[in-house]
Image (cartoon, rainbow, N blue to C red):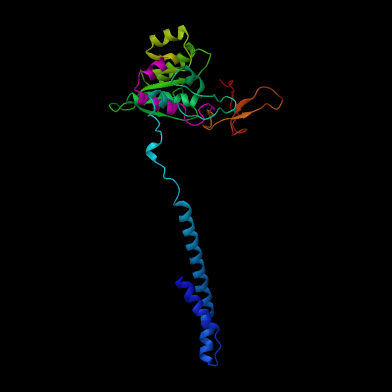
Amino acid sequence: MQALFIGVVLLVLSVVPSSNTMLQIMATAIRTPAWIVLGMGGALLLMHWLIAGLKTRTKDLPVIDKSARPTRPAPTVQERREPVLGAPNPTPGMPSSVSAWGMDVLERIEWRRFEALIECLFAQAGFETRSQSHGADGGVDIWLHSKNAEGPVAVVQCKHWQGKAVGVRELREFLGVMTAHGIKRGTYATSSTFTTDALAFAKANGINAQDGSGLLRMIQSRTPEQQDELMRVATEGEYWRPTCASCGVKMVERTPRKGGAAFWGCVNFPQCRATLPIRPRRI
């Protein structure tokens, strides 16, 4: 109100006629500031009216008692293990949901998530782990190190297969890699199973053969907190979309030009021509 009053006074003084040249110069000089002050006064008055009106409309609103709101009980261990994945996505290969630890988890995650899961298992056991996300691995997916020894003390090879058992040939190749590096301890982990001959070969050569069922027993023997960590690792990101083994990037759906079933292809095509079949989406 004071700014508005001052603006009016200045504006009146600036327009009062006078025969004195000095007064006319002063009147001209204060005319612009008078309009500025008058405008500021009007804006402040408008803001005052708006604030007063808002207070009038809100003062009678009911007060909500927050203590009366229902509280959600703390989640159970089972609930904490189940990641919230949202509504099912129709993208090929994407599952509708993931339950608590079971064979369905090992089947639905892609090969890179499977390797990350195995690496986390050994890290929880106290090993220092080293791995690479893509490229030629020389037959070793994970190197295991101990604080009490120099160099790797064991190696791990992961095979994320479905419906196909790991045979003697794969175990024999793995033993060759162990021998080449002078390492006597090795684990061959698969989401599938081993043939009878492969299991006999592994036992005779000191290879720890872990199939899908054995891995699940190992996971379920961990604490609830460790199982939660393993689930987060396994279902990180687009856990169902395969990673290009050569480039280390997620693959995309492609359709053959001449027709046929869709497949996963590398985004770096044609520089990279890596492909994988699209598994039917489980309901």
**Which of the 4 image quarters holds residue 182?**
top left
The C terminus: image quadrant? top right
Pick the residue in front: 236 or 66.
66
Q: Nearer the viewer, residue 127 or 110?
A: 110
Side (left or right) of 181 relative to 110:
left
**Identity of the residue drawn at 51% across and 77% down:** 8
Q: Residue furthest toward the right?
A: 258
Instruction: Tell me where residue 277 appears, x and y as whole percent.
Output: 59, 22
The relative height of residue 53 versus residue 246 in the rendered view (above or below) is: below
Q: Residue at x 41, y 27 (%)?
A: 80
> Viewed as shown, does residue 268 lie left or right of 239?
right
Figure label count = 0
Q: In the image, is 122 to the left or to the right of 39?
A: left
Horizontally, residue 283 falls left or right of residue 208, namely: right
For the magenta stretch, what is the residue range? 214-242
As for residue 230 lying within the magenta part, the answer is yes
Does the rendering let one see residue 1? yes
Please tell me whether residue 231 is drawn above or below residue 30 in the rendered image.
above
The image quadrant that residue 70 belongs to is top left
Residue situated furthest left in the rendering: 148
Camera-side residue: 226 or 51?
A: 51
Residue 205: x, y in percent? 38, 11
User: x, y (%) of residue 253?
Assistant: 61, 29
Q: Main secondary structure of the magenta part?
A: helix
- Residue 102 forms part of the magenta stretch: no
Q: Residue at x 49, y 79 (%)?
A: 9
Residue 40 location in percent, x, y?
Answer: 50, 69
